[in-house]
Amino acid sequence: MARYLVVAHQTITSPELLKVVRGVRDQDAEAEFVLLVPATPVRHLLFRKGDEHDAEATARKRGERARPLFSKKGVPLSDVRIGAADPAEAIDQEVAAHPGYAGFVISTLPAEKSRWLRMDLPRTVRAKHGLPVHHVVAEAPPDVGPWL
């Protein structure tokens, strides 16, 4: 059974992300998924309600909101984890703490809106970990406000 790390924040409930994760599941019916939500500082989000102290609470709420949606689409999550604010650091910490991932699904906003793409996150993760990276470009759903 292969285990994949799904990394998302503002696009966590996007149809594009769910479609790609479902596609991975279709290729391997035994695939297992862990959702990692970096605790992005609120000032970096498209909708900037709240303050800096809300970052972890915002990430946790988004992750918990995603769990039933993934399950409904036939992709149960084995866990939802909150990571460091920096997505590359969050991924590194997760892989170090729980080795054995078969690959990554990284969901970003489109290039003109994506801080993660300006950081070149998909390429950085692929180069550092030497595993497949499925990069999903998705619009933020209309319900992306921090207090989901």
Image (cartoon, rainbow, N blue to C red):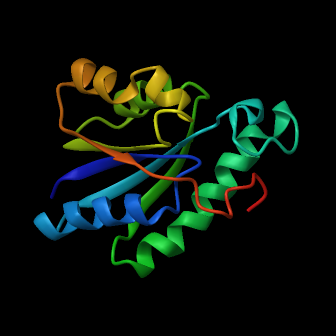
**Above/below status of 83 relative to 142:** above
Quadrant where the C terminus is found in the figure: bottom right
Residue found 66% across the figure and 63% down from its top: 142
Q: Which residue occupies the extreme front position in the image? A: 112
**Above/below status of 141 relative to 136:** below
Residue 28 visible in the current orientation? no
The answer to whether 101 appears left or right of 49 in the picture is: left
Query: Percent x, y for residue 119?
Result: 46, 20
Query: Percent x, y for residue 46?
Result: 70, 42
The answer to whether 62 appears left or right of 104 in the picture is: right
Residue found 45% across the figure and 52% down from its top: 138
Query: Percent x, y for residue 68?
Result: 52, 75
In which quadrant of the rendered view does residue 32 lie? bottom left
In which quadrant of the rendered view does residue 55 lie? top right
Residue found 23% across the figure and 42% down from its top: 103
Q: Which residue occupies the extreme left position in the image? A: 27
User: Number of numbered discs present?
Assistant: 0
In which quadrant of the rendered view does residue 124 lie? top left
Residue found 23% across the figure and 19% down from its top: 127
The answer to whether 86 appears left or right of 75 in the picture is: right
